[in-house]
Image (cartoon, rainbow, N blue to C red):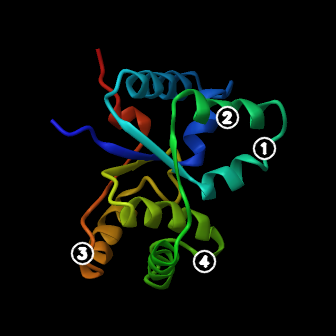
Amino acid sequence: MRIPKIYIETSVFNFYFSEQSADKRQDTMKLFAEIKAGKYEPYTSDYVLQELKRADQPKQEQMIELIEQYNVMFLSPNVEAERLADVYISRGIIPQKHLIDAQHIAMTTVSDLDFIVSYNFQHIVKRKTLLMTKTVNLQEGYREIGIFSPTEVIEND
């Protein structure tokens, strides 16, 4: 069986260390345990790194170390991902001022990953985004991707 390839969006790294939500932190830690166990092949991108570098220390350093500790592979921005993100914006899926959210989804799509994992419920993990990106992706010659929170991905006991 093929191991699913997942894109880990910025908010997931943040909740690994968050004191604000014990449930989200626990689910995030479980996701990383499942990554370590080989259940998922993890990816992130330079877009995420840009966002992580805006965090205060020592959290910034901890989140970057998490990427290294779990061998999360980096994807570099490319022309096709930028173009597809612009399509998401022009179709009203993601607001222009949240371009980086569109770039995360586009990077997942053009890199042929299976799904994106995020706690961004405002622009990424929502039904409208899932349905509309599916339509655009198929129109643009790509396959559908999943859009989930860590809670939806992890195995429950």
Query: Residue 15: image x %, image y %?
Result: 60, 33
Which residue, given by chain and number where applicable, does mark 4 sit on? 96
Check whether the beta carbons of the residues at disc 3 and disc 1 lie within 8 A of each other. Answer: no
Identify the disc placed on residue 107. none
75 vs 138, left or right, is: right
Which residue, given by chain and number where applicable, does mark 1 sit on? 55
Residue in the picture at 60% in, 37% down: 13
- Which of the two discs, 4 and 3, sits closer to the camera? 3
Element under label 2? helix
Quadrant containing the N terminus in the rendered view = top left
Residue situated in front as seen by the camera: 15 or 85: 85
- Amino acid carrying mark 2 in the image: Met
Q: Earlier in the sequence, mark 4 or mark 2?
A: 2
Query: Residue 86: image x %, image y %?
Result: 51, 81
Q: Which of marks 4 and 3 is nearer the N terminus?
A: 4
- Amino acid carrying mark 3 in the image: Leu
Which residue, given by chain and number where applicable, does mark 3 sit on? 138
- Amino acid carrying mark 4 in the image: Gln
Q: Which of marks 3 and 2 is nearer the N terminus?
A: 2
Q: How far apart are marks 3 and 2 (CA)?
A: 34 Å
Residue placed furthest toward the bottom: 90
Check whether the beta carbons of the residues at disc 1 and disc 2 lie within 8 A of each other. Answer: yes
